[in-house]
Image (cartoon, helix red, strand yellow):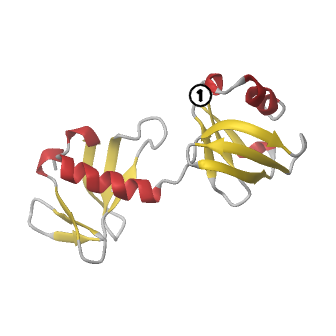
């Protein structure tokens, strides 16, 4: 289903409803990004409550503004990956350790269980999982300040 033909609304219960080209209505549709970190605005599947893909969207920018806004709102509520902007301190260079960080969503602290919870993403990105499974993103190591990089280097 091409993006400009997409018929998507939100019902009174706050659930997304997709009407497919055959006229069938699917309630509780969930958008799923194929590449949430490297290409968040591309390759998005609309998945029905049974887990089957109902529609594919190449790019969010191809959609009508009202449909794009609905999907962006839904994706924002599902994708909680704060981006670390600065490391303020770490409690220890051995794990587990408590990290105090500044993110794009404010200041927070989390516990890193082990160094294996730090994964490289491409050449310059990192994904750090805290002890509760919350993922923190460092999009570009080179963009961190010197003190943050020095702290982080002890774990890499």
The answer to whether any part of residue 59 appears in the image is no
How packed is label 1: few (under 14 Cα within 10 Å), some, or many (20 or more)? some
Question: Residue 62, how many percent across, how many down?
Answer: 20, 39
Quarter holding the C terminus?
top right
Which of the 4 image quadrants contains residue 132?
bottom right
Residue matched to label 1 = 140
Question: Residue 29, how many percent across, how many down?
Answer: 30, 65
Residue in view at x 66 percent, y 48 percent: 107
Residue in view at x 34 percent, y 70 percent: 50
Residue in view at x 13 percent, y 46 percent: 4
Question: Residue 152, how many percent across, how many down?
Answer: 77, 32
Residue 7 lies, with reference to residue 24, above or below; the image says above
- Looking at the image, the residue that sits furthest to the front is 106
- Looking at the image, the residue that sits furthest to the bottom is 13
Which of the 4 image quadrants contains residue 49?
bottom left
The answer to whether any part of residue 92 appears in the image is yes
Residue in view at x 48 percent, y 53 percent: 79
Question: Residue 2, how many percent across, how many down?
Answer: 15, 45
The answer to whether 33 appears left or right of 79 in the picture is left
């Amino acid at each position: 289903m091409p993006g400009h033909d997409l018929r998507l609304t939100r019902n009174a219960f706050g659930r997304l409803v997709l009407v497919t080209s055959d006229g069938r209505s699917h309630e509780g549709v969930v958008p799923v990004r194929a590449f949430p970190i490297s290409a968040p605005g591309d390759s998005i599947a609309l998945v029905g409550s049974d887990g089957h893909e109902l529609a594919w969207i190449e790019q969010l920018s191809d959609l009508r503004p009202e449909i794009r806004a609905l999907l962006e709102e839904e994706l924002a509520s599902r994708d909680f990956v704060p981006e670390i902007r600065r490391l303020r301190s770490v409690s220890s260079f051995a794990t587990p350790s408590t990290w105090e960080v500044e993110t794009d969503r404010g200041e927070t602290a989390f516990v890193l269980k082990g160094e294996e919870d730090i994964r490289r993403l491409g050449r310059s990105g990192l994904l750090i999982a805290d002890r509760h499974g919350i993922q923190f993103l460092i999009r570009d190591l080179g963009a961190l300040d010197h003190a943050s990089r020095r702290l982080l280097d002890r774990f890499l």
